[in-house]
Amino acid sequence: MNKYVIILYMTIVMIGGIVTIYGQQTEAQSDVVIPNEAVRLRILANSDSPEDQALKRAVRDAVNEQITTWVSDLTSFEEAKQVIAQHVPDIEQTVARVLREKKSDQSYNVTFGRVSFPTKIYGSYIYPAGEYDAVLITLGKGEGANWWCVLFPPLCFLDFSTGEAVRPVEKQIEEQERMDEQPLVVEDEQQIEVKFFVAEVWKKLIQ
């Protein structure tokens, strides 16, 4: 009898642990709120080709690292806008350097001002389409998928570009078909460790 009580207890512990971990991850994403006074960064790739998207990410990493050093200690929105506006020539130099290093002859344009953004969803928040203060970097024709984050306050460790509020019907069907063909449950290391531990205990108890 005691053996079955222990098995039941371990099962409850496993389920509780997984629920707690999942809840923490969900809360971490749903609590992200972009304030009204924010400066964004938006980068438009030349196209959706793997090469152009890789180039966009290289520019993103270099520019984000550079701008973060300028705004990390700032607390004023107006001051952040002023500092970033003054450094636009430096951002242009950084973009040019990355293009040279990647041996790309793409044109580029860097501006700072009011930039149009599409509607996006992140966590439980919907960020409506509109014009926002932002650094806009356009690579080549600027016809590829964009990437954007929030420079001030510093939130560029989060990628807001992936939360599409409106997706083409064809894309939704394609994604559903892919999920039907190969359902996949993604688990992090903590979830796997909990399940492995409980499985080992269970195995020993029923032997």
Image (tube, rainbow, N blue to C red):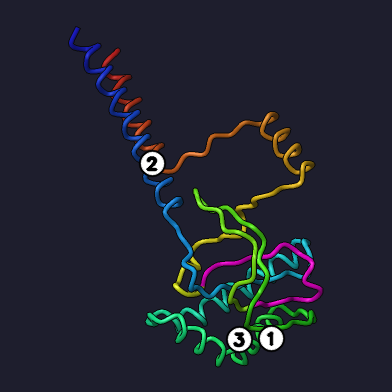
Q: Is residue 85 above or below residue 195?
A: below
Q: Which mark is residue 196?
A: none
In x, y percent, where is residue 65?
Answer: 51, 77
Q: Is residue 2 above or below residue 106?
A: above
Find numbered disc 2 in the image and state the secondary structure of the residue it sits on: helix
Q: Residue furthest left?
A: 2
Kind of residue sitting beneath label 3: Ile
Inspect the magenta stretch and tell me whether residue 201 lies in it: no
Towards the viewer: 49 or 25: 25
Find numbered disc 1 in the image and state the secondary structure of the residue it sits on: helix
Read off the residue under disc 1: 96
Inspect the magenta stretch and tell me whether residue 143 lies in it: yes
Q: Which mark is residue 23?
A: 2
Q: Is residue 37 above or below residue 105?
A: above
Residues at discs 1 and 2 in contact (Cβ within 8 Å): no
Kind of residue sitting beneath label 2: Gly
Magenta segment, which residues? Answer: 136-150
Towards the viewer: 126 or 72: 126
Q: Residue at x 22, y 12 (%)?
A: 3
Q: Residue at x 45, y 72 (%)?
A: 154
- In this rendering, would 136 be left or right of 39? right
Earlier in the chain: of badge 3 and badge 1, it is 3
Find numbered disc 3 in the image and state the secondary structure of the residue it sits on: helix
Read off the residue under disc 3: 91
